[in-house]
Each structure stands twice: as structure tokens, then as C-alpha cells.
Amino acid sequence: MPRFRLSTTRTTLLALALTAICGPGLVSAEPETIQSLEVHASPRGGVVARATLHLTAPPAMVQAVLTDYERWPELFVGGMRVVRVERYPGRAVTDLYLTHILMPGERRLLCENRELPDGLVTTLLGGDFKRYARTWKVGSDGTASGTKAEFELEVEVDTVAPDWLVARVLKQELETHFRALKSKTDERARLTIGH
């Protein structure tokens, strides 16, 4: 009896669709952390994401975690290798390699990260992405120690997956990323208070 066999591309797309519909099985960040999160396909191609977060650590602590480039893999779902970090006054160049179900193989992401007093602006310098621009704005939430963080991302990768599916998967991964960011900033705040 002949066996039904799917191509690798079709199998990958089927797995992605099931993940997007059913969810990856990861716990979302607490509702009070994510005040808003919007992810959608961009008319120009790729995906746009915007979020507003409330973090209980002070802005300087959040900024320290966001600019701890060597530890970025701890904040993201999937495989990330930090190959090189070159630090300059007010900026850093990061050379990363990413693996993801949406991208066969390993993809290079070479970016400049401009460190601002109230955030971080990341722009694409090279690699395997068509477009990548990320902005973090961090500031006081009006309390003595909390942070309001605004996040924006525009990303386009060369993938067989449709943008709507990339947007769906990215939304789930950002929820996990924001949870990891909250955990790391809380941990740093506890360590600082403990000293």
C-alpha cells in the first residue's frame, strides 16, 4: 500500500499552521506585564509588532538587560548564537545567528544597536534578513521603581511561510520574550537590592 508523503516544505507549513492555531504550549506573560500587543502583516511585506509593557524594575535596570548583548539568547525562543559584539561609545554592533522553524538553516542578523538614554534602537546592517528595525523606549511608569516600556519591530525574512502565519507565531514568541525580559529585570533588581 503506498504511503502518503509530504514534502519538507509542506510539512513545515503544516507544523507552523498547527502551532499558530493551537499555540506553542508556552505560558504567556502575566496580563499586567503586557498592557498591549499588536502583531500584523505589513502591506510592504514582512511583519510589524508594537507593544506596551509594565515592568516592576526601574528603567535603568531594564536598559541594562536590553543592552546585555552577550545574554540575549536567554531572552528569546529558539536558537540564537551571539558570534560577536563590538562595543563603541553609545552603540554596539551585534552579529547573531538564528535558527527558527520559519527559517530553514541558520540565518545571520548583523545589526547596529544605538543606546539612547531612554531606550535602544536596532537597525539592520547585513545578513539574511530583508528588513529588521527594532525600537525600545523605556521610562518611569510614574511609580518609584516601575518602567513603562514601548516596543516596536519591523521584520521581514526570506521564508516560504505567509506573513499572516509569521505574525501569528511572532506574537506568541513575543509574549514569551516579554516574560523572559520581566524575569531578568526582576532578578537584577533583587540582586541589586540584596547587595
Image (cartoon, helix red, strand yellow):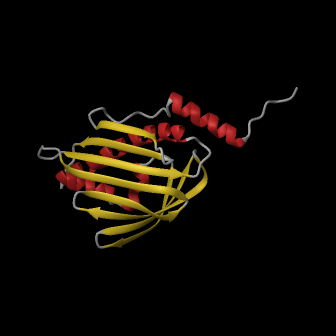
| Residue that protrudes farthest toward the right in the picture | 1
Residue 14 lies in quadrant: top right
- The residue located at (37%, 59%) in the rendering is 122
x and y, in percent, of residue 142 in the image: 13, 44
Image quadrant where one finds the C terminus: bottom left
Q: Is residue 34 above or below residue 107?
A: above
- The residue located at (44%, 37%) in the rendering is 172
| Residue that protrudes farthest toward the bottom in the picture | 88
Q: Is residue 52 above or below residue 154?
A: above
x and y, in percent, of residue 184 in the image: 31, 49
x and y, in percent, of residue 12 in the image: 64, 40
Residue 63 lies in quadrant: bottom left
* Number of residue marks: 0
Answer left or right for 189 relative to 174.
Answer: left
- The residue located at (33%, 59%) in the rendering is 121
| Residue that protrudes farthest toward the top in the picture | 1
- The residue located at (35%, 38%) in the rendering is 37
Q: Is residue 96 above or below residue 103?
A: below
Answer left or right for 127 relative to 65.
Answer: right
Image quadrant where one finds the N terminus: top right
Residue 51 lies in quadrant: top left
The one nearer the camera, 159 or 19, is: 159
